[in-house]
Amino acid sequence: MKEIELKAWASEDLKKEIDLLVGKKCENVDKFDLYFRRPGEIVQALRIRVNNGELELTAKDQRYGAVSEDNSEYELRLTKDQRDEAIAFFKCLGYEEYFVKKKIGYSWIYNGLHIELLKVNDIGTFLEVEALLPLDAKDEEVTEAQNKLVDLFKHFNLLDKIERTSYRELILNGIQSKPHISQR
């Protein structure tokens, strides 16, 4: 899957506005991510996620485009009782545990977009919106998805709160509730 994503610093009060726009009930989100990397490398390569009780293994090819984060993501679902085996498997391949990310909040589907309003670790609250496309999506499809994301952030008046710094960097650098636009 190709995921086209934007995130912005937000307030929990935004939930009411999203509920009004979407017009249907949200779902609760409870994600616990354990990231792995090769020793000495900075960027994470693998993730084990417990997502509302389900276990997902993810490898991500992360890229930052001019407008959004444009990632290729490969997922494998396991039973939740296979978590320890997955950790041992990654360690056997030479990966080490790197950092933990916890997301709690709400989720909606609207206009083909996956919308989440999340508290992330102790760094703050974010609006995170993504469009999922096939890995072989055409450039026009990516541009259309990016435009939908930007339009939604305009609707919520959050264009000036877009954060391009990765959660990894925010967590590891101890950035907390600092609404700004990060320069890359």
Image (spheres, grey):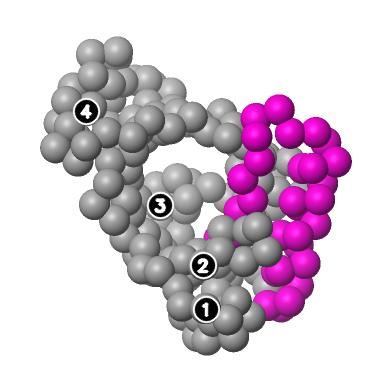
**Residue 42 forms part of the magenta stretch:** no
Mark 2 Cα shell of 10 Å, populated few (<14), some (14-19), many (≥20): many
8 or 84: which is nearer to us?
84
Residue of label 3: 171
Residue 8 sits in which quadrant? Answer: bottom right
Viewer-nearest of discs 4 and 1: 1
Residue 39 percent across, percent down from the top left: 34, 20
> Which of the marked residues, 3 or 4, is nearer the chain's N terminus?
4
Name the N-terminal-most of marks 4 and 1.
1
Horizontal side, residue 75 vs residue 70: left or right = left
Marks 1 and 3, the one that precedes in the sequence: 1
Residue that carries the numbered disc 1 in the rendered image: 24
What residue is pinned by disc 2? 108
What's the residue type where badge 1 is placed? Lys
Rendered residue at 40%/52% (across/down): 171
Rounded to the nearest angstrom, the CA distance separating label 2 from label 1 is 8 Å
Q: Give neighbour class at mark 4: few <14, some 14-19, many 20+ (Cα, 10 Å).
A: some
**Which residue does the numbered mark 4 point to in the structure image?**
87
